[in-house]
Image: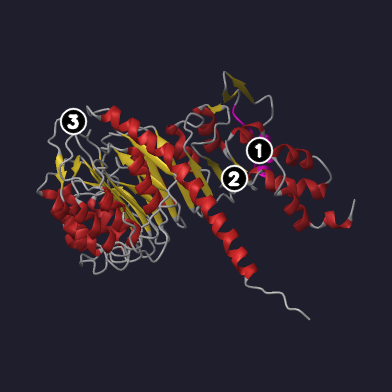
Amino acid sequence: MHEALCISEILLHICAFADDRTLAVLARCCSPFHECATRVLWHHLRSLAPLVRCFPSNMWRERGGEQEFVRPPGPKDWPRVLHYLRHVRRLERNLFDKTSLPKLHPQVLWMIAALNPALILLPNLRRFAWTHWSCIPTECIPALLSLFPADVRHIALGKMSYLPDILPSISSYITDKFICLDFLKLTFASSGISAPELSLPLLTHSLTQLHCGSDISFDKESFNLLSQLPNLRSLSCMLPDIRSLSSSAGDSVSVPFPALQTLQITATAHCYSAFTKIASLQGVHTVQLTFTEVVTVQQLPLLFAAIRRQFSPSTLTSLTVLVTHRADTERLILVPSHMSPLLIFRRLLMFNLRVHGEPRLDDEACSEMAHAWPHIQSLTITSSHPLTDDIHGLPTLGGLVPFAVFCPHLTYLKIRFNAQDIQQTTLSFPHRLERPSLTNLCVHCCPISRPHSVAAFLARMFPRLTNVNAYGFEDTGSGPEWMKDWAEVRRYLPLFADIRADERQWVEVERKSEAGRRIEPVDR
């Protein structure tokens, strides 16, 4: 064997690019290969099946796709298990992993947790992320967590089955044991679950990211403690009805959430308005607000004013506001004056607004948004309600011109506008300092006529536009006809792009030809 293959660093580098089957073969070779291949092979486990298979074959069986113990493990059954599990640093399987793996019978984990001879079964584990509870039952999570060391840094429990008695046990175990935790995620598989308030009394100061499903809310004491964590950068949770933030000593918190940068909360309009009065989050740059109750037309300006009050115009770069609805509620009409409080956020790169009504933003409103958000890259204003044939108050194609002129970085635009009765004056070519970047235009039930003129306008205003996605036409009487016209627009746009490409080639040919004619031969 070559001397270089005796150097562990070189072997580890080779093993890092090998698949599991190759690593298994290398692990059965000579001792230098065995050690390096084993370290890489066991570094990341996608199931606990390999753990069970380390026990003697007469101790377990697999029946009907489920692993179970035939007898309890004895003292002599553990050495092989302990040898391999010391290499495990990640136990992780995400929702997109479709590999078929055997299910673990609950009795297996409970026996392992009860009879494990070592203080910690996975001493070097640092990351645990799981969403496939078909392989590991949710009721076994506390037993599984007992096998982990205190210095685990990442725990993500996603898509759990809701078991009322298990959730408090999980949260208590996590907060009491894992003192180095910097990432925690808890979500349920089903939405609409009314979970009790969660108590996390001893969250570590090292925590930087906390993500809980919209069905999990904190009690007021836990939320108070969250607001004092010095390193918490990302928070996702349901907002409790809280009117003040105080420290453990009873004093008011002067700077709540001092390190927070990303906030994603689900709340009622009432709770959120109260929250903005006690917490100014000037360092947050990414926000998503989901309102769970119907917001009336009177409440909408107050909510936007509360957003303006809570966040800094010089920091906020991404804002998403989602307003839910019920089928029996009156639709909300979004008018230009509603948007005024949000125009102060001049550094926005992404804006997404979904209301349970009809956006009626005219050409002037589009112009104000384009002027206010010169750095915007993605702009979405849409409705969760089925739309109607009523086109009153919609911006025209001319309302898109300011986005071409003042928003050179805009690549994605989703807004309802009226593309009917296009005027030739609208096609005038505006002066622009930069070429528009728009490549994706989503037209949500947008009225249209004369698709060839609309396509010509879009091709001239947004020369990089390649994708027009039309949808939401099924609930209007004119929808099918509009849908056909937008299909025509999609057919014309590539033709205009080909013409522009040919024209650029001819310009280049003529430029080179002109340069050649200027060089006169010199007679000697």
Q: Amino acid at mark 3?
A: Ala
Residue 116 included in the magenta stretch of the image: no
Q: Residue at x 17, y 50 (%)?
A: 271
Q: Nearer the viewer, residue 415 or 103?
A: 415
The quadrant of the picture occupied by the C terminus is bottom right
Q: Nearer the viewer, residue 462 or 68?
A: 462
Residue lying furthest right: 1
Secondary element at tag 3: loop
Residue lying furthest front: 523
Q: Which residues are magenta?
A: 72-84
Residues at discs 2 and 1 in contact (Cβ within 8 Å): yes
**Can residue 188 be seen?**
no
| Closer to the eye: label 3 or 2 | 3
Q: Amino acid at mark 2?
A: Ala
**Can residue 498 be seen?**
yes
In the picture, measured across the screen, residue 264 lies left or right of residue 79, that is left
x and y percent of residue 96 in the render?
51, 36
Q: In which quarter of the view is residue 48 placed?
A: top right
Examine the rendered structure and indicate whether residue 70 appears above or below residue 158. Answer: above
Q: In which quarter of the view is residue 194 placed?
A: top left
Tell me which numbered mark, 2 or 1, is placed earlier along the sequence.
Answer: 1
Residue 82 included in the magenta stretch of the image: yes
Badge 1 is on which residue?
78
x and y percent of residue 373 in the render?
30, 61
